[in-house]
Image (cartoon, rainbow, N blue to C red):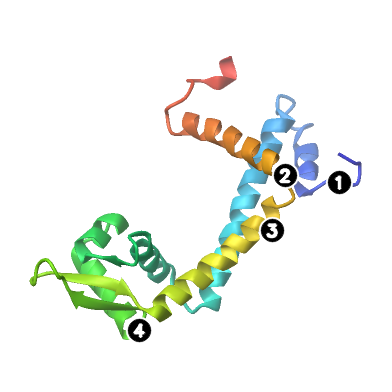
Amino acid sequence: MEPTDRDWTDEHVARWQPVLPGLDPEIEGAVTRMKKFSVHLRRVREQSLVDFDLERHEFDTLHKIAGRGGSAAPSDLAADLDLAPASVTGRLDALERRGLVRRTPSTSDRRRVVVELTDEGRTIWLGAMDVVGHEEYRLLGVLSGEERTHLNDMLRRVMLVAEGQGAEEPWRN
């Protein structure tokens, strides 16, 4: 790293090292950068929702429908969104009024309906997704393919510990 290649986190770590002599600068730097990266992407996502006139819960509902191939039963959406069926009905009513989804009778059971993304709903969902996707590629595109693979592998190892599937108390090793 060149002396001029310092980011905000380098200054943050330098400020805290004299205050906390046991601070591991590599751990503090990595954790702080991951937090800032996550906050940055969240801001981009929030702005994309504003740009596409979507509330977070609307996007989440469209996303779950898209993730099921573009159509889903309301009961499946309730499970996917961890919501009561009545809450899903309210969401679907609003999305249907906006022309983003449509309900059609199930072909296998006349008592049920299927919720489908309309062309407009798919376009809006994809547009919001593309904004975040382009920013992710812009930021991680500074890494080579091999570096991205390595970063992904390292983060997986960290997340396995965070999810309780990895080594206990790794700081003692």
- Which of discs 1 and 3 lies nearer the camera? The answer is 3
User: Of the residues under marks 1 and 3, which one precedes in the sequence?
Assistant: 1
Residue type at tag 2: Ser
Distance from Cα at disc 4 to Cα at disc 1: 49 Å
User: Of the residues under marks 2 and 4, which one precedes in the sequence?
Assistant: 4
Residue designated by label 1: 5
Instruction: Please say if 95 is above or below 156.
Output: below
Total numbered badges shown on the rendered structure: 4
Distance from Cα at disc 2 to Cα at disc 4: 42 Å
Q: Which secondary structure lies at badge 3?
A: helix
- CB of mark 4 within 8 Å of CB of mark 1? no
Residue type at tag 4: Gly
Residue designated by label 4: 99
Percent across and percent down for residue 71 are 29, 67
Q: Residues within 10 Å of mark 1 (few under 14, many from 20)?
A: few
Residue type at tag 3: Arg
